[in-house]
Amino acid sequence: MTCFETIQVFVSLALFAACIGLADSASGESGDMPPLIDRQVFFGDPEYAGAQISPDGEFVAFRRPHQGVMNVWVKPREAEFAEARPLTADRRPVPAFLWSQDSRFILYVQDRQGDENFHVYAVDPAAEAEQETGVPPARNLTPYEGVRARLFAAPKSRPREIMVGINDRDPRVHDVYRVDLDSGQRERIIKNDQNVASWTFDLDGQLRLGSRQRSDGGTDILRVDDGQLTVVYSGDFGETCSPLRFHPDGRRVYLVTNVGARVDRTRLVLFDPQTREEELVEADPEAEVDFGGADFSRATDELVATYYVGDRQRVYPRDETFARDLEVLRNQLPEGELSFGASTDDESLRIVSVARDVDPGATYLYNRETGETQLLYRARPELPVEHLAAMEPIRYTARDGLEIPGYLTLPRGLPAEALPLVVMPHGGPWARDTWGYDPYVQFLANRGYAVFQPNFRGSTGFGKAFLNAGNQEWGTGAMQHDITDGVKHLIEKGWADPERVGIFGASYGGYATLAGLAFTPDLYAAGVSYVGPSNLLTLIRSIPPYWEPVREQFYRRVGNPEDPEDKQRLIEQSPLFSAHQMQAPLLVLQGANDPRVTQAESDQIVVALRERGYPVEYLLAEDEGHGFRDPWNRLASTAAIEQFFAQHLQGRYQESLAPPTRETRERLTVDVQQVEAPAPVAPTN
């Protein structure tokens, strides 16, 4: 997103330095530690990503940089990657794409500078490139200003159509449309006048189910009959019931559910919306975690495998052919966790990837008929994996006796004694950390930090009791206590230096950073909040309109600002109103167009700390939203984080900055004296 020629020169220089595994200048270098790896290797764009084979098996599409931005490319399956040509020339990285069912189009989504109003575009790979752009023309299939489109289905039986949700009539809900891929014409299938949050189609492309949240926070699944909706399955607040995919018989639907007083972890069932009969398909064989996912045959639509994620992923074949494939792949590919991507219509060819904690992995083309695997690419071939650090599962006991799972990564080359520690609470918060490659974890470990990732209560994947134990427990409650108790556990073990503990997170993790500094000020020496909310009252009042169908979920899991008791608790749990207690330096990162955590959330905490004379730094990206997608924004912000922690936790850091990174950092850096914020909605101390 700057001058193409300048970017290419400096990318080449950075990658050359990265290939030898060294930064050209470093502070705090230790002969016992691995070499300092250039930050470009971790946070620059990958060489290739997201490969998908076309259903007819003729082409492979993937993402790679084009004019300095991650775009979609295509090549004939047998051709070398050097023969590929770009299909898109967007100025903002393309986040996701897929083939149409007949292999005629590439469909991709794009928003505008992080506003999350995604539109769906179609590109014909066979079309001639336009002279101005150098790529085939892209057609916007949802060309409506201020609209967020959602792709619900691309059924095999209707290869020239896709089913899309569009909220142009009412920004709070998505009506469902059938969109013709050739003409772009749309036909409304159903008007959403019952607050439905999501829709489910069967394998023939017929709209069959809707899911909505009730006023009490529970969930209803509704059968669709000629536009009429009938409740056929319900769960109470705190329970999960979500359609996954229709069965090939066209009658039953796979449902992920933990509805029922005796059921804690989600399981997979088959449910008949007509008779309302339910049949258990599978629950975790180890009775450890929630149902994790499923794989279905493209050729037959039958269930062929299930997945569960405990400390690591477990795969359970439910089909003899898949079981043979899994054995062949495990024998041929490096150790790691397998993921299965797109396949051809006859399933003779399939994309398979393998990754592990110290390697973002490689992508292969698997030929089922010959049993051979062909390496397509390594995601980051310049990454010196031999110098990266192992991520290990960890358990500890919270103050109320509950066992909390997490992960700990210790830096290579240093004894596990009195290490500087960076705590990384995950976002969501209704999500979880998993074992695998994380660029921030490995980057920080390479700089000499131990990195701690707690799956505090409120995290998903560990059953509804664990999830619901986090309800309204933000900040001053058990969710933050779990993070605090984990840090104290590492200190008691002697692994962490109590004087050099930092905390860094994005979204909810950014909130947990602010909460840690405000409510346990003696624990942390520095914090980095990345798109983190500082005021729970304004956070909830500013949620995007298309989240309206799930607003009650926020009220019950976080709090309702219109309820007097909730409001008081939300004030007490908002770091903004306890900013006077903060002692540690704070670095704030924010996207100006973030629709989830608006810029005001960061502005107001910066102003609150500035007015008290407390140390605070601020980076604001005018062209980003909820997280930075532009590679130079990522590199500039990472350089700021690196230097910030080195200053306050005494880790290593790379002093040199390539000119585009330096220029971007200067552009993002805000003079905190110039920041203005709206008057707080509640009095501060």
Image (cartoon, rainbow, N blue to C red):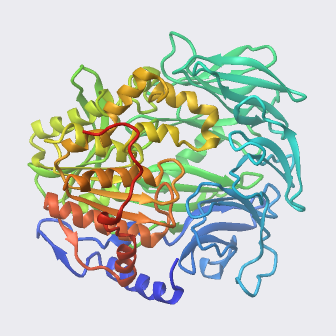
- Above/below status of 416 relative to 431: below
Would you say 343 lies left or right of 337 here? right
The foreground one among 682 and 525 is 682
Q: Position of residue 672 (x, y in %)?
A: 30, 63
Q: Position of residue 472 (x, y in %)?
A: 40, 26
Quarter of the image with the C terminus is top left
The foreground one among 676 and 127 is 676
Residue farthest toward the top in the current orientation of the protein: 261
Identify the residue at horizontal 43%, vertical 73% (top origin): 632
Res 421 seen here: yes
Quarter location, residue 435: top left
The foreground one among 147 and 98 is 147
Figure disc tally? 0
The foreground one among 590 and 576 is 576
Identify the residue at horizontal 59%, vertical 40% (top origin): 323
- Above/below status of 526 relative to 5: above
Would you say 660 lies left or right of 114 here? left
Res 45 seen here: no
Identify the residue at horizontal 60%, vertical 54% (top origin): 116
Identify the residue at horizontal 32%, vertical 50% (top origin): 605
- Above/below status of 308 relative to 153: above
Q: Position of residue 651 (x, y in %)?
A: 16, 62
Quarter location, residue 105: bottom right
Q: Position of residue 649 (x, y in %)?
A: 15, 57
